Image (cartoon, grey):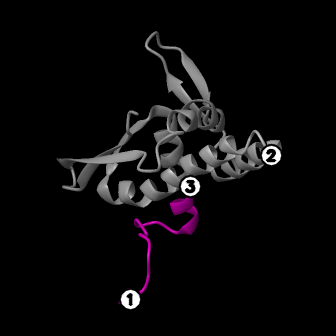
Amino acid sequence: MRHQKHGRKLGRDTGQRNALRRNLIADLLCFEQITTTEAKARTIRPEAEKMITLAKRGLAQAGERPEAVVHARRTAASRLPNVRTQELEDGTFEDIDVVRKLFDEIAPRYAQRPGGYTRMVKIGRRPGDNADMAVLMLVSD
């Protein structure tokens, strides 16, 4: 029995689970919306919100403690992949720096919001295996 065992295993061992979590959070921060299973969305939602809060606090302390921004950026960089590649409409590819986008675009957008940066919308079941699907997105503010 799984009494007092928190977290979902998602059918993976620890290394695979950590890699999946990092990649899904990076995709959410880069593309601002991902479609995944409900279990994966529920797993990464709190951690994605913590990354946004980390960036917000680092930027808020920038005036009195400039080293706080560096510390927050390094902490975020240790928890996220470096880049994501996005295909543009003309067929070319562009590399997106995940930490830079988090600190330069996402965190200032939510500077006045006390929390709740993500929204999960259930979209039904996947036809192949009948898994519950959800769209996890950053709220517009």
Which class describes the residues within 10 Å of circle 2: few (<14), some (14-19), or many (20+)?
A: few
- Which residue is more in the foreground, 77 or 129? 77
Work out which residue is located at the far top of the displayed protein and give it. 90
Q: Is residue 79 visible?
A: yes
Q: Is residue 122 above or below residue 29?
A: below
- Pointer 2 residue: 65
In magenta, the rendered stretch is 1-20
Residue sitting nearer the eye, 38 or 74: 74
Residue 19's disc is 3
Task: Measure the alpha-carbon separation of dots 1 and 3.
Answer: 26 Å
Quadrant of the snapshot with the C terminus: top left
Q: Residue at x 50, y 47 (%)?
A: 25
Question: Which numbered disc, 1 or 3, marks the residue that appears first in the sequence?
Answer: 1
Q: Secondary structure at mark 2?
A: loop
The amino acid marked with disc number 3 is Ala
User: Where does label 1 land, which residue?
Assistant: 3
Query: Does residue 29 appear left or right of residue 95 in this picture?
Result: left
Alpha carbon distance from label 3 to label 2: 32 Å
